[in-house]
Amino acid sequence: MTNQISALLGLLQCPACGVAPLESVAQPYPDDLPFEPSGQHLRCHQCKAVFPVTADHIPVLWTPALKAQMLAEPDPESNLGANLQIYNTISDEYLAYTRRLPENALRIRDAARRLQDIFTADTPRYHLDFGCGPGQVLGWLQDTGLTPVGLDVSLANLRNARQSTGALVVCGDATRMPFRADVFGLVTEASVLHHIQDWQAVVREAGRVCHPAGGIVLDAEPSREMVAFSRLAVFVFDLRFPVYRLLSRVWKSKYIFRNTEQAKLNLKAEIHHQPGTGFPLEELKNLFLQAGYELHLFHSPGADLASVKPPKLQNMILNLLSFRNPWNPKFGSFTALGAAPGKQLIERTSR
């Protein structure tokens, strides 16, 4: 396990000053912690900020906001606290029951292969999955030949991700990633960006840590058009809690609705995936351009980016109640690929 810290040090950067590398200090973290620490901690070369390492050797490179949530009971009224609380609770079930459709893995693999096709000899052979959860994406991309690294705010998620995939893992905030610039060839996330309040900062950080000859994947995210439901559709949507609670007794994938308070906490975590929210695609495109990447958008992709999946029953009903065509792919989730401007992303048919 200590070898994991050594393997990570060349990638890490102080999240406090945002400029300097970190060094390992062979002494325990100097302050009290809510988790068992190891006999070492990390220290910034420049600003001398110190960061703990858990007893099972996960570096905790927290921002002040994440530190405040981790040192106390997470505040469910805070978006960050809601995410921390919900995933510390459901990580095992999320790994077992969520994102199990084979099309999810196939689509992510297709996206990664398209980007790897444009890699150059200078592209770093590291893959970062931020908001990695318990490790699904890291597992799907194990055969890419890239060294996997997972970033998440939840230690429960990181332990599951490391156990299931063997990835290097770091506890940290995606709005201020604790990594040096240009160290990853591939940066991915799946159904994560809509969980983070300051999503613009996350996109900028993804562009900073990704090498210019690499690529970025954002998967299963809601556009503003997708969740622009009518009042009638929103009224019907809000009635789902008692129905899903009954279904959760039969469908294990509905585990989140067994407890209504837990389901409502998840709503606070999914801050940009509520009616009337979603991501403005033109702003997303401009953020990628500012970071040096061209955005390639795919609406409602199926098992590969070239296909279009049919709408789910729930989305079909909500779109019909919003008086719009539910089969229009622009009213489904999107996958976005970021690559150097002018690079052609070749369609891959092999899986």
Image (cartoon, helix red, strand yellow):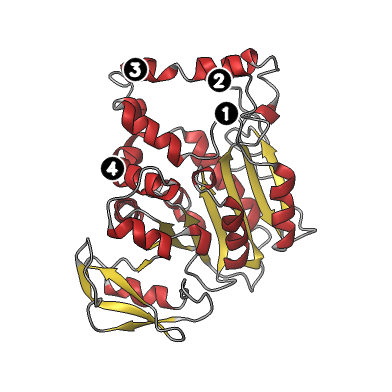
Given contact means CB atoms under 8 Å apart, are the residues at marks 2 and 1 in contact? Answer: yes
Label 3 – label 4 distance at C-alpha: 20 Å
Give the percent coordinates (x, y) of residue 305: 64, 39
Q: Position of residue 118 (x, y in %)?
A: 68, 60
- Residue under numbered circle 1: 275
- Disc 2 or 1, which lies upstream in sequence? 2
Callouts 3 and 4 close, C-beta under 8 Å:
no
- Tell which circle, 2 or 3, labels the residue nearer the N-terminal end: 2
**Can residue 118 be seen from the camera position used here?**
yes
At 68% from the left edge and 39% from the top edge, which residue is drawn?
298
- What residue is drawn where x is 49% and y is 41%? 105
Q: Which residue is disc 4 drawn over?
A: 89
Q: Which residue is mark 3?
A: 247
- Vertical position of residue 108 compared to residue 19: above or below: above
Residue displayed at 70% across by 55% down: 287
Q: Which numbered disc, 3 or 4, marks the residue that appears first in the sequence?
A: 4
Of the numbered discs 1 and 4, the one sitting upstream in the chain is 4
Q: Quadrant of residue 45?
A: bottom left
